[in-house]
Image (cartoon, rainbow, N blue to C red):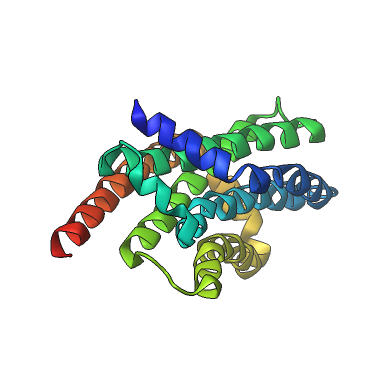
Amino acid sequence: MHAGKMMLVDMRRCKFQLTLILLFFPIAVFMMRGTEAFDVMGTLYLTFAGVIMAAQPFLYEQRVEAGFLYLLPVTKSERVWGRYLFGFSLNLVMVLATILLVALKGNLMQEGAFFQIALCFGLGMITISLQYLLFYAIGRIKSQQFAGIMMMLPGFCMYFGFSFLMEKVGNDWVEVLFWMERHMNEIMIGAVVAGYLIWILGAVISLAIVRRKDFIQ
């Protein structure tokens, strides 16, 4: 119950940053023009944007005025789960934006559309969970510059790593697509299930980290 309230607290604190979705979406529309490869990069860009925005609450916690959060009548478990719910809900918003993006292209009824959407959902869940786990493991960061790097790093690794993979495959990319088409259902289910499992596991480990740090202190 209180975890949901903490999620709403994060949303209220980051409401200005969340409006940037309106800026990211036209950029993704521009990137998806032309070939099918641009479709992939457009939806991947939305996932990348969601990962970056999901880290915003951690940047607020580095500020002195964020101390009031620790005065709220909630447990450590509710704070951690509220933060992970924020990441989940934001990733869900980016998935809805991805659906709109694919629909604008006129590909929503095609067989590969839901595969693309499921892949982006799973990739976003995994990257956000690993990013949160990293922030909880490091703890309070005094340098705003370093915190900014930590916010951008997972998303950049995901986005440019996928771009590098596409370039590395090169002419064999068509064969990879054929293989993915043959195993489309398995990959879709695997991406969604893996996203959920890593999200839950990340929250459990993060909570253990928070409790251990308090115990040591």
> Is residue 164 found left or right of 33 in the rendered image?
left
Q: Position of residue 159 (x, y in %)?
A: 60, 60
Q: What residue is rendered at 55% in x and 39% in y?
A: 11
Name the foreground residue: 58 vs 112: 58
Q: Is residue 217 above or below residue 80?
A: below
How far across and how far down the image is residue 118, in percent?
54, 36
Tell me where residue 81 sits by quadrant.
Answer: top left
Quarter of the picture holding the C terminus = bottom left
Query: Could one spot residue 34 in this view of the protein?
Result: yes
Q: Is residue 183 visible?
A: no
Instruction: Say how many tags the image has.
Output: 0
* Percent coordinates x, y for residue 126 in the rendering: 43, 49
Check the picture and name the quadrant holding the N terminus: top left
Determine the image quadrant of residue 73. Answer: top left
Q: Is residue 51 left or right of residue 30?
A: left
In this view, the residue in front, 9 or 178, is 9
**Looking at the image, which is closer to me, 49 or 40?**
49
For the point 63% across and 52% down, the residue is 49
Q: Horizontal placement of 148 versus 78: left or right? A: right
Camera-side residue of 126 and 19: 19
Residue occupying the point 67% across, 37% down? 98
Q: Is residue 148 above or below residue 187?
A: below
Instruction: State the image coordinates of residue 119 (x, y, percent, origin top left).
Output: 54, 42
